Structures are given as C-alpha cells and as structure tokens.
Amino acid sequence: MTVLIDQPRWPAHDTLWAHLVSDTSLEELHAFAEAAGLPRRSFDLDHYDVPEHRYADLVAAGAEPVGNRELVERLQASGLRVSQRERRDRPTPSA
C-alpha cells in the first residue's frame, strides 16, 4: 500500500496544489482520502488535488512525499494513469 503526494507547486484559486495518488489501486486512494477528510469532489480521474495547507497533514497520515516526476512514473507503472487524451475524450456530465 503506497499513497504518494508531490510538492504543492501548481497555482490555482489563490493557493498552491499537490497531487495525491496511489500506485496500487483507486480503492486504496479513495480510502486514504476519506480517512483524511478530503472531499470526493477533489478527485480528478486518477488523483486528488490537495491544497497546500493539507500537505503536512497528509504526510503525517502516511502519504509518501515524492517528486512530480516520480509520482507520474509510479502512477503510469501502476496502470492507473489517465492520459491527457483520455481526459479530453471523456464525456462531461450533463447538468
């Protein structure tokens, strides 16, 4: 069981954001996120977007800090990575 988190460095909405992923399964990722109190709406197909102020809490809860490149490589190796093309081709939910 390994949940990974990269450094918060992606700016949006007046904060920096990190990514939380599992290199094992989405079930593991969702269970970790739920236990940590992350809202399901922060899930984006293969990762959770995490605001900078939650980073230390998630590391303390057991997320392994890694660099962005390692996070992507391990996510790809797990088979859970959703490509940019798959993201574009995914139908958007109707309102």
Image (tube, rainbow, N blue to C red):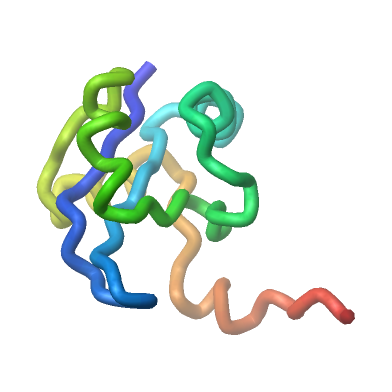
For image coordinates 14% across by 40% down, the residue present is 66
Q: Position of residue 35 (x, y in %)?
A: 53, 22
Q: Which residue lies furthest to the right in this view?
A: 95
**Residue 93 shown left or right of residue 55 in the figure:** right
Indicate the quadrant where residue 83 lies.
bottom left
Question: Foreground residue, 88 or 33?
Answer: 33
Question: Foreground residue, 48 or 22?
Answer: 48
Q: Is residue 80 above or below residue 16?
A: above
For image coordinates 31% across by 31% down, the residue present is 58
Q: Position of residue 31 (x, y in %)?
A: 57, 24
**Residue 57 shown left or right of residue 46 in the figure:** left
Question: Foreground residue, 28 or 51?
Answer: 51
For image coordinates 58% across by 29% down, the residue present is 34
Indicate the quadrant where residue 74 lies.
top left
Q: Position of residue 65 (x, y in %)?
A: 16, 35
Q: In this view, does 10 lie above or below 70?
A: below
**Residue 47 shown left or right of residue 60 in the figure:** right
Q: Where is residue 59 in the image (x, y as percent from the top left)?
A: 23, 28
Q: Is residue 16 above or below residue 22?
A: below
Q: In which quarter of the image is the N terminus?
A: top left
